Amino acid sequence: MTPFTAELIGTMILIVFGGGVCAGVNLKKTFSHGSGWIVIVFGWGFAVMLGAYVAGDISGAHLNPALTISLAVAGKFLWSQVPSYIAAQMIGAFLGAVIVWLFYYPHWEQTDDPAAKLSVFSTAPAIPNLFFNLISEMIGTFFLVFILLVMGAEGMAFADGLKNLIVGFLIVAIGISLGGATGYAINPARDLGPRLAHFLLPIPGKGDSNWGYAWVPVVGPVIGGIVAAWTYQILF
């Protein structure tokens, strides 16, 4: 398996399990309907962990364009590989969203709320305020990238497989503490790839894909990740 394929499959797995938990919670007539935010954040934590286990030994399991760019800024990844990694992540995220759509196919028609359907694919702010929504995504991604960089620093050793488990719990921690304002995309591929799937797929009563907000979970994580990389370079 090549790094491109590993990033694609790892990101696809991330969205299948992450988007899947959102679908289970938000779509009508599922057994998990209405089970709430804690279920969602743990679902996303496990989703990242599983994607990382699949891709980690091959590509490093970035699974996130903001992380890929940040690692390049920090001098820990080649800029020449950034485009191919981001392309793989976007394709994988799109394919993962298509799988979620297919898996929950009967439930789309049973769900009346277009916002609930969109929430399976992409994030939205609890209180729309583009400036502060952007700040929220920047801060959430800053802590994601900074902590990952510190975890990867020289002298920081983990037993085989333990690091990916810790990363999963890091996603849970960010979701519980910093996810309530914007749904914590903290990953451009996680939001943009599935949002495009929402736009293209024949989902009954889906409404619009909220493209006016779509730039926030793309730009915010990239800026936050770059600031985290600079901070890491200054401190370490």
Image (spheres, rainbow, N blue to C red):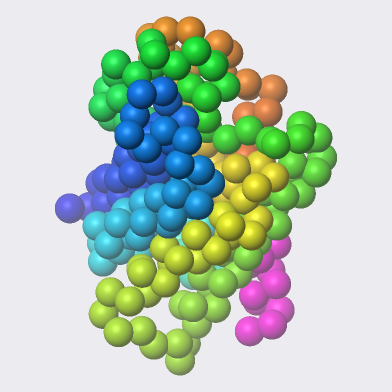
The C terminus lies in quadrant: bottom right
Q: Is residue 133 left or right of residue 85?
A: right
Figure quadrant of residue 69: bottom right
* Residue extending furthest toward the left: 1
* 4 to 161, vertically: above or below: above
Q: How many marks?
A: 0
Residue toward you, 117 or 123: 117
| Overall secondary structure of the magenta section | helix
Image point (50%, 66%), residue name: 170
What residue occupies the far bottom of the structure in this picture?
Answer: 155
Whether 160 is drawn above or below 24: the answer is: below
Q: Name the residue nearer the viewer: 235 or 108.
A: 108
**Taking 136 as reference, is 97 left or right?**
left
Q: Is residue 10 above or below residue 163?
A: above
x then y, percent, for residue 94 = 38, 31
In the image, residue 153 above or below residue 53: below
The answer to whether residue 232 is visible is yes
- Residue at horizontal 50 percent and vertical 52 percent from the top: 38
- Comparing 62 with 52, the one in front is 52
Residue at x-position 68% and y-position 36%: 125
The residue positioned 42% from the left and 72% from the top of the image is 166
Q: Over which residues does the magenta segment extend? A: 222-236
Q: Is residue 92 visible?
A: no
Position of residue 176 measured from the top left corner of the image (x, y, whole percent): 58, 57
Q: Position of residue 169 (x, y in %)?
A: 45, 66
Hey, which quadrant is residue 145 in on the image? Answer: bottom right
Where residue 21 appears, as percent x and y from the top left, is 39, 41
Q: Is residue 21 magenta?
A: no
